């Protein structure tokens, strides 16, 4: 399980594959200077509920992966998550589409 940290305090525990896809979407939005909401369901260990944070280019974010290898990215999932991030409700994790279209990413997390 990986972790997403917001402003050094708030965190979400996510599967490394989920976290890698969210990182791509979040990085692309913030690189373009586009703030947005990110909402997730809280882990039962910290109480049930959901958390929403306002992400903006000066947010302090940390993506901590459990594994050392970058998971392959599914372009269809990145596209679906990006679409959600562009809505008024903002980004939230949805299930990965059954169809997988892998996308190539360089060592810096950029699409070549």
Image: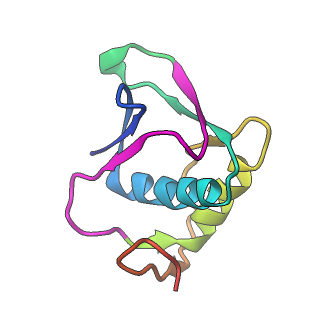
- In the image, residue 42 sits, relative to residue 82, either above or below, namely above
Q: Position of residue 33 (x, y in %)?
A: 67, 53
Q: Position of residue 84 (x, y in %)?
A: 71, 49
Q: Is residue 67 left or right of residue 91?
A: left
- What residue is rendered at 35% in x and 68% in y? 71
Residue 82 is left or right of residue 65, and the answer is: right
Residue 96 in view here: no
Residue furthest front in the image:
58
Q: Residue reaching furthest right?
A: 88
Count of marks overlaid on the render: 0
Q: How is the image coloured?
A: rainbow
- Give the residue drawn at x 56%, y 53%: 26
Q: Is residue 67 above or below residue 84?
A: below
Location of the N terminus (image quadrant):
top left
The one nearer the camera, 93 or 11, is 11
Residue furthest bottom as drawn: 112
The magenta segment:
50-71
Residue 76 picture location, percent across and down:
62, 69
On the question of residue 100 being in view, the answer is yes
Check residue 44 for magenta coloring. no
In the displayed structure, would residue 53 be above or below residue 45?
Answer: below
Q: Residue at x 27, y 53 (%)?
A: 65
Q: Give 95 or 19, whichever is nearer the viewer.
A: 19
Viewer-nearest residue: 25 or 7: 7
Q: Is residue 1 left or right of residue 104?
A: left
- Residue in front for this viewpoint, 71 or 31: 31
Q: Is residue 62 magenta?
A: yes
Q: Which percent across, then down, holds residue 106? A: 41, 81
Q: In percent of the image, x 54 and y 42: which residue is there?
A: 58
């Amino acid at each position: 399980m990986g972790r997403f940290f917001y402003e050094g305090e708030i965190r979400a525990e996510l599967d490394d594959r989920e976290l890698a896809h969210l990182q791509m979407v979040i990085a692309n939005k913030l690189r373009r200077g586009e703030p947005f909401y990110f909402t997730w369901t809280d882990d039962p260990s910290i109480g049930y509920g959901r958390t929403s944070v306002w992400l903006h280019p000066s947010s302090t974010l940390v993506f901590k992966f459990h594994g050392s290898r970058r998971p392959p990215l599914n372009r269809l999932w990145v596209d679906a998550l990006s679409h959600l991030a562009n809505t008024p409700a903002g980004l939230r994790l949805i299930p990965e589409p059954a169809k997988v279209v892998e996308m190539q990413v360089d060592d810096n997390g950029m699409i070549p």
